[in-house]
Amino acid sequence: MASVLLLLPTAPDSPTGNATTARRLAQELGASGHACTLLQCEEHGPSGSNPAAPTGTETAAPTEAAAPSADREALHIAVQAADVVIALNATRSGPPAAALASRYHKALVVLFTGTDLNGKPHGAAIRAAAQAVATVALAPHAQKRALTLYHLDQVELIPQAARPLAEPRGGAPLPTQAPALTAQDFLILHPSGIRSIKNPLFALEALEPVARDLPSVRLWFAGPILEAAYAQRFEKALSQHPWATYLGALDSATLAACMRRANLVLSCSRSEGAAPNALLEAALLQRPIAASDVPAHRYFPGADFLFRDASTLRQRVLQDMDEPEPAALAARRLHEWTRMRFDRVSERVAWDRLVRGVQAGA
């Protein structure tokens, strides 16, 4: 069995997509007998110093690893103890992970997680991907884009597993900061982080005409603030819409409670690296879903659940309010398809095979 170090650009316990993916992979690899360690390897700007390059012989990357000095020794010790190093996000974790893997002669795997496929990657990220003995994408559109952007000959496709939100028996209560709802209220839930690429402002602007005409419409946002400047714009806009509420980052049980109450779960993202975890979770709870027409959403939840613009989103909401039965039926069908297509066994077997192969060839 292998000792696997997963390096990610955020804290392992954060509510971000990278951390969620890393925790899931660690659990699945652990179930296959591998020993996994998760560490943050966060980059800073070009003026930063690179703790992954303790000598002056390595070229600084456009984005730099900048773990607190107290953590640098632990980072180097963890790399030395690892058989395989997996960098989540090629542009942010890729360069420092590549420097560490090269210094200690460790096998490197780069996992493309989403934002590293938006725009042109910097040279250090391209070099990190080229150094990797294996690169992995989570969805076909991401695989195709990674091949092109990073000039690679091969990128392995391993779809992520859909995992249900953890919740207590009997369910959890709605968050205390949530406004009271009546049985007639039509609740729309936007369970994504507050950042520009997730596009929560679009939901406010698109649904305002519906909420103005139909007082029963409610819109809740749940997720961490990931971009401070965007959050200021969002909060200013939100203050003008009393029918909408930001709940903050929620734990798994509370998010599950919100999803179970929601009449529609919404994703307005401009881009995703794979099937969004929040939509997979919503599908497992048999909730109706509406998602923007981008490649990741065409992959999941699929064409039947997409809206093209603000007008088609409003049409979808009005349709579900008038005739909820077709939406409920579609949600049940999506639930069954999700369970079969994104199962944990397939993900576990694929990653176990990859890690074993990398370890054997190291």
Image (cartoon, rainbow, N blue to C red):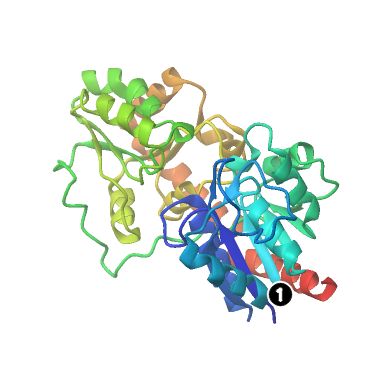
**Residue under label 1:** 83
Of 85 and 168, which appears nearest the observer? 85
On screen, residue 159 versus residue 226, left or right, reads right
Q: Is residue 184 above or below residue 360?
A: above
Measured along the vertical axis of the image, is residue 63 above or below residue 316? below
Query: Judging from the image, what secondary structure is the residue with disc 1 in?
Result: loop
Depth order, front residue of 134/157: 134
Determine the image quadrant of residue 355.
Answer: bottom right
Q: Is residue 287 left or right of residue 60?
A: left
Q: Residues within 10 Å of mark 1 (few under 14, many from 20)?
A: many
Can residue 143 be seen by looking at this rendering? no
Residue drawn where x is 41% and y is 42% of the image: 226
The quadrant in which the C terminus is found is bottom right
Where residue 203 appears, as percent x and y from the top left, is 37, 28
Residue 223 against residue 206 in the figure, above or below: below
The residue that appears at 31% across and 44% down in the rendered structure is 262
Q: Position of residue 332 (x, y in %)?
A: 46, 50
Q: Residue at x 65, y 61 (%)?
A: 54
Q: Amino acid at mark 1?
A: Asp
Q: Quadrant of residue 105?
A: bottom right
Estimate the x, y position of residue 275 in percent, counting from the top left.
56, 46
Quarter of the image where one finds residue 147: top right
Q: Looking at this view, is 285 or 41 the one in front?
A: 41
Q: Which residue is pictured at 57% across the width and 43% down the height?
A: 300
User: Is residue 321 among what the camera can see?
Assistant: yes
Q: Position of residue 85 (x, y in %)?
A: 67, 66
